[in-house]
Amino acid sequence: MRAFTQPSFVAACQAPWTGSNSAVEFTQEIKSEEVDFGGGAAKAASEEHIPVLLREVVHSLIQADSGVYVDGTYGRGGHCRSMLARLAPDAKMIGLDRDPEAVAAAQVLAQADSRFSIFHARFSQLADVLEQAGVVGGAQGILLDIGVSSPQIDDASRGFSFNADGPLDMRMDPTQGLSAAEWLNTAVEEDIAKVLFVHGEERNSRHIAKNIVAARPLSTTLQLADIVEACVPRNRNNMGKHPATKTFQAIRIFINAEDQELRAGLEHAFAALAIGGRLAVISFHSLEDRQVKHVFRGLSRPPSMPRRLPVRHSDQGISARLIGKSIKAQSDELATNPRARSATLRVIERIC
């Protein structure tokens, strides 16, 4: 992963929040959009997958019907197809996904719509993808949908779910890197505990790590889930949450280097925007959202300067503006897609 070299991204690490004056108006505009969450464009994308915050994503990103747009996590194409439906014949849509199964599914759309092309790539490779695609002048809109997808969770053979037995894999790209089982069966107890605490905020990380090492070798998801369940008491205030939720999240993030990919993805995506272009990011848990929020705040505020220093507003070096506040799924979407409950959308626009 490249280190941040742009001054705006270095400054993003120290940014206080400056709210958007148009947050209320923006939310009202979104509510006026009509999307059929059980069908329409979402259903056309896949009978098994409903994209989250579809109405909000389309409304936020499509400011003009021409130009270049990027779906950084194609998945099963719900967001991508909906955006294509709003774009002109001369527009261009580029899709990325690190999952070979998602790339294979996207080939169908690429053959049917000449405006769309798909690349087997990660967030950190976005700059290379845009260069290969011949993009000049920047993108009008880029979407990053962070984390694991519903098709990956629902397929027990991928090893992401603690509710169904399957091989303990968890790799978004099964052709690269160590599987979860390979890592858990060889890592030292201290490293396992650290991963569970840092990436899952799991208070019982040391106890769980000790029991994992004692039970090795592990090979299936239910083996791991049972070990964790024996270590972590159920939350009386949230009995529906499985005790292994944080552990599976932490291991998945580590195995796929998701935190590094997100940081690199934010850097490359913002750098790839045209002036006036927008970056929309969907996250599903607080660790991801905090990272996105931190970077967005930094990009949308001036750098720290001595008090009373006479500097014109136009010379303050602000590179972006926040578009509204964080956006959550509304009741009509939650009624048909409960998984959208944990999704958060943040949008930023490049201004210089």
Image: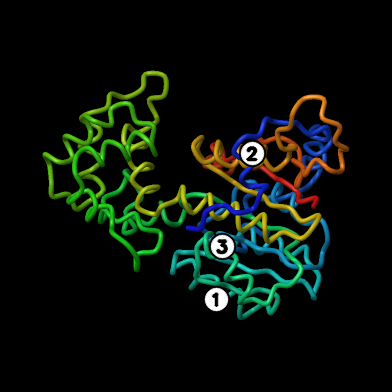
- Circle 2 sits on which residue? 329
Choose the circle earlier in sequence order: 2 or 1: 1
Mark in the foreground, 3 or 2: 3
In the figure, is residue 106 to the left or right of 212? right
x and y percentages locating residue 68 in the rendered image = 73, 67
- Circle 3 sits on which residue? 74
Mark 3 belongs to which amino acid? Tyr
For the rendered model, the colour scheme is rainbow
User: Which residue is the extreme one toward the top?
Assistant: 236
Choose the circle earlier in sequence order: 3 or 1: 3
Residue for point 13% across, 46% down: 216
Q: CA distance from mark 3 to mark 2?
A: 20 Å
The kind of secondary structure element at disc 3 is loop
For residue 90, what is the image quadrant?
A: bottom right
Q: CA distance from mark 3 to mark 1?
A: 11 Å
| In-front residue for pair 26/332 | 26
| In-front residue for pair 268/311 | 311
Q: Is residue 253 above or below residue 89?
A: above
x and y percentages locating residue 315 in the rendered image = 84, 43
**Does residue 334 appear in this view?**
no
Dot 1 alpha-carbon crowd within 10 angstroms: few under 14, some 14 to 19, many 20 or more: some
The kind of secondary structure element at disc 2 is loop
In the figure, is residue 147 to the left or right of 315? left
x and y percentages locating residue 297 in the rendered image = 67, 37
Q: CA distance from mark 2 to mark 1?
A: 29 Å
Residue for point 64% across, 46% down: 53
In the figure, is residue 118 to the left or right of 182? right
The kind of secondary structure element at disc 1 is helix
Residue for point 79% across, 47% down: 33
